[in-house]
Image: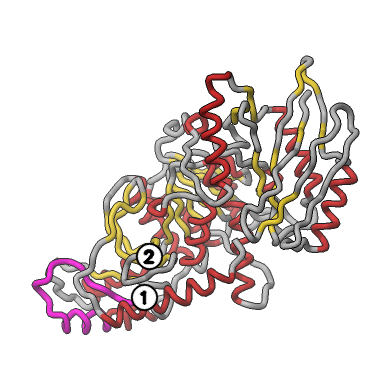
């Protein structure tokens, strides 16, 4: 039997977090004192304060003692209560001392962040901190998350603790070797997150192209919807339907298709609902596929790709939005097969923001078509493109095209949403579609276009400004 002991430091991780602090207590039994701290700069919701009082009632000292074969274990943890609590789950970390090592496994990563089904499935009002603590106790009984270091290992642990401190500031550069040692067991594993129409369309398109040795569809909805039931009934080869996020482990690509279906009134509220959902999903899925590529199809794609990048702490080249790939493929088809134009080997892409502000741009050699000819041709093609809708099945085909380029390292050029800072004189951290070469490591190169139109730059900068303004209002 083991002891769960919580003693976090009282330090703010970010301005939007409110730390939940407990004090060391007298040893043994269930006796002790709990301290719930609320700094003057933090404001808990009434619901959150009521919930923390319940924690105090169920765990008067927040120290649960058990023994295993005469050995006693202290497992320090830190809970961060977000200002969106109780609608979003706490962020949970182990807080090891210098003589403790982290046992990386299913529920703990190398930085000490804790991943539990209770956190992944958090849903107000049925999910509460008391229930989280109870599950933490049960899971840590099954698999102890910490171990005692030898004296020779303690110096290395000091360095690890410094990295854990950085994690609370959104920095991650530690790879989990123990958890990643099964990475190559499935050569081409792909996960699609979301069992809606788009998720099913992506699953069918990827399956039809024969890209995946194993394809996991994570259905996060309650109950069984028609499309999901049909997939289950007809049992596609190599396709697994699951509600367990850990089923995605070691995926080469994780495709996000989920969108919040809340009844929010404003556009900002709708986007924030998506952010709240991603807050519970992205860190866990990133933990299970630490060397994969995260491909975002959720809307608005530019903002949700930015959110995924921030929440995952992945390098920017491995977080990609589907962006204008579908529009670019259609535009090239219209020019070549509908207008039957001779482009002298030049390629054309749609870049920028999905929607009305997207713009065409040309690549290739300077010689050949004149600039005026290019503009006339691309404008005519864009007129024909405008009447084309983006239905789930067509987006699914575009997603499968991107997954194919990534998994099979095709080094093909796609116009996808990437971190656009530094391009077209954009100085903010926003994601916009630019032509890129895709491979197994995600983005390997951004293609330079031959035409530097002032109007193109102005449109991209305008899009970047509006996107950045909305991002600043979101609570990550």
Q: Residue furthest top?
A: 69
Of marks 1 and 2, which one's residue comes earlier in the chain? 2
Label 2's element? Answer: loop
Foreground residue among 313 and 441: 313
> Quarter of the image holding residue 9?
top right
Pointer 2 residue:
421
**Marker count (numbered):** 2
Identity of the residue drawn at 38% across and 46% down:
211
Q: Examine the rendering and report whether any part of residue 211 can be seen.
A: yes
Q: What stretch of residues is rendered in magenta? A: 358-380
Q: Position of residue 80 (x, y in %)?
A: 69, 50
Q: Is residue 463 left or right of residue 81?
A: left
Image height of 359 relative to 203, above or below: below
**What numbered label is drawn on residue 181?**
none
Image height of 218 relative to 15, above or below: above
- Rendered-image quadrant of the C terminus: bottom right
Of the residues tagged 1 and 2, which is closer to the observer?
2
Asked whether residue 370 is drawn in magenta, I would say yes
Q: Is residue 132 left or right of residue 466?
A: right
Asked whether residue 465 is drawn in magenta, I would say no
Q: Position of residue 18 (x, y in %)?
A: 71, 56
Label 1's element? Answer: helix
Q: Examine the rendering and report whether any part of residue 231 can be seen.
A: no
Identity of the residue drawn at 19% across and 70% down:
450
Image height of 100 relative to 55, above or below: above
Q: Position of residue 236 (x, y in %)?
A: 50, 45
Pointer 1 residue:
460
């Amino acid at each position: 039997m083991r002891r769960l002991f919580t003693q976090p430091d009282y330090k703010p991780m970010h301005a939007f977090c409110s730390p939940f602090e407990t004090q060391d207590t007298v040893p043994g039994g269930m006796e002790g004192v709990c301290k719930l701290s609320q700094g003057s700069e933090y404001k808990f919701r009434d619901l959150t304060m009521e919930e923390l009082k319940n924690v105090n009632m169920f765990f008067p000292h927040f120290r649960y003692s058990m023994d295993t074969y005469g050995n006693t274990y202290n497992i320090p943890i830190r809970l961060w209560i977000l200002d969106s609590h109780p609608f979003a789950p706490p962020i949970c970390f182990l807080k090891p001392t210098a003589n403790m090592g982290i046992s990386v496994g299913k529920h703990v990563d190398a930085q000490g962040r804790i991943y539990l089904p209770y956190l992944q499935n958090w849903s107000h009002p049925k999910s509460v901190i008391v229930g989280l603590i109870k599950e933490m106790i049960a899971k840590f009984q099954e698999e102890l998350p910490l171990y005692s270091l030898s004296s020779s290992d303690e110096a290395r642990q000091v360095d690890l603790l410094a990295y854990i401190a950085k994690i609370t500031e959104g920095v991650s550069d530690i790879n989990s070797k123990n958890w990643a040692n099964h990475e190559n067991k499935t050569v081409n594993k792909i996960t699609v997150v979301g069992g809606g129409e788009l998720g099913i369309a992506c699953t069918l398109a990827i399956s039809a192209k024969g890209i995946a040795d194993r394809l996991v569809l994570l259905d996060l909805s309650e109950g069984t919807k028609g499309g999901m039931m049909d997939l289950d009934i007809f049992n596609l080869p190599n396709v697994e339907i699951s509600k367990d996020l850990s089923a995605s482990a070691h995926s080469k690509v994780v495709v996000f298709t989920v969108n919040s279906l809340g009844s929010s009134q404003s556009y900002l509220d709708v986007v924030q609902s998506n952010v709240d959902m991603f807050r519970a999903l992205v860190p866990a899925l990133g933990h299970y596929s630490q060397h994969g590529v995260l491909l975002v199809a959720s809307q608005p794609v530019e903002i949700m790709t930015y959110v995924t990048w921030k929440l995952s702490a992945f390098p920017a080249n491995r977080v990609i939005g589907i962006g204008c790939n579908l529009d670019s493929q259609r535009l090239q088809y219209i020019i070549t097969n509908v207008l039957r134009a001779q482009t002298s080997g030049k390629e054309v892409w749609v870049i920028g923001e999905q929607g009305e502000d997207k713009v065409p741009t040309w690549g290739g050699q300077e010689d050949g078509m004149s600039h005026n000819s290019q503009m006339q041709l691309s404008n005519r093609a864009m007129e024909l493109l405008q009447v084309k809708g983006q239905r789930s099945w067509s987006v699914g085909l575009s997603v499968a095209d991107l997954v194919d380029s990534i998994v099979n390292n095709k080094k093909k050029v796609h116009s996808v949403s990437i971190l656009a800072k530094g391009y077209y004189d954009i100085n903010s951290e926003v994601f916009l579609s630019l032509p890129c070469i895709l491979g197994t490591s995600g983005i390997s190169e951004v293609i330079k276009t031959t035409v530097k139109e002032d109007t193109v730059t102005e449109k991209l900068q305008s899009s970047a400004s509006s996107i950045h303004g909305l991002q600043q209002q979101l609570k990550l």
